[in-house]
Amino acid sequence: MPLFNSAEPIIRRKQHALDFQDRQGLLKLRLQISNKTLFQNIYTRIDQVFMVWGLITAVIFFTAQFAPIDWVTQAAFWSVLTVVGTAGMTMLTHFWVKVERLRWVLYAWIILMLGGVAITNFGIYCGSGTVLMHLCHLWLGLSAMGYFCTGIGLRSRAFIVSGLFHILGIAILPFCLGWQFLATGLVMSANLWMFAETQWDMRPPIDNYSILTEEQKEFNREQYLIRQA
């Protein structure tokens, strides 16, 4: 069996025929003025994780670029936001990764994020110039590793491409001169929000969902047929 399903688009508009595990905690947003709908979309818990991390990365890197705050204060600020984001990610995705048997992907992201915080704090509190000069490289590299893990786990070309996009971001950092934090924030946040707003490719549904009832499994099979149509 091939690793990726080349017949499925890498990125497309969101589908509304969602599996049981995707419908849990579903968020529906609609912006309407009078009888005219300006915006509407649905966000699964996975989408909500992308939205939260997109906001967190924007706040962290834009603050680093523009705010006249000392590094020690920023390190504490970054640590709190990253830990909060990691905890939120764990709570939002816990059921989904259990159903999809992808807990190892969640664990990989947790290790990468907390490891990044530890290295960042070491660089700032211990005055390591090497770390301080490569903070943007560090976080783009950690994100790339996370997307590669996600791409392999979900058998998704979209996440593999995203990992390569972050590697490309590292390559262009030397050309950003004094705007590296801004460039890093834009790369990471835009990528996350893109995933939140679109439907990305992944492997077909697995047949032996161990924690779903037979009715829920049948519901998922019907939803899959609707999506394929």
Image: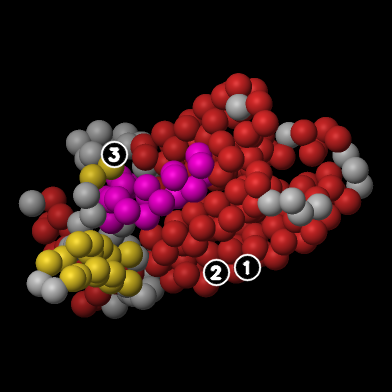
Labels 3 & 2 near each other (Cβ < 8 A):
no
Residue type highlighted by circle 2: Gly
Question: Quarter of the image holding residue 16?
Answer: bottom left
Distance from label 3 to label 2 (Cα)?
Answer: 27 Å
- Residue occupied by mark 3: 10
Compared to residue 25, the image places residue 130 above or below, namely: above
Q: Nearer the viewer, residue 187 or 31?
A: 31
Distance from label 3 to label 1 (Cα)?
Answer: 30 Å
User: Residue 85: x percent and y percent?
Assistant: 58, 64
Labels 3 & 1 near each other (Cβ < 8 A):
no
- Residue occupied by mark 1: 84
- Residue at image coords 36%, 75%: 25
- Please state the extent of the stretch shown in magenta in the rendering: 186-205
Q: Which mark is residue 88?
A: 2
| Among numbered discs 3 and 2, the one appearing first in the sequence | 3
- Residue at image coords 29%, 50%: 198
Q: Name the element at disc 3.
A: loop
- Residue at image coords 65%, 47%: 66
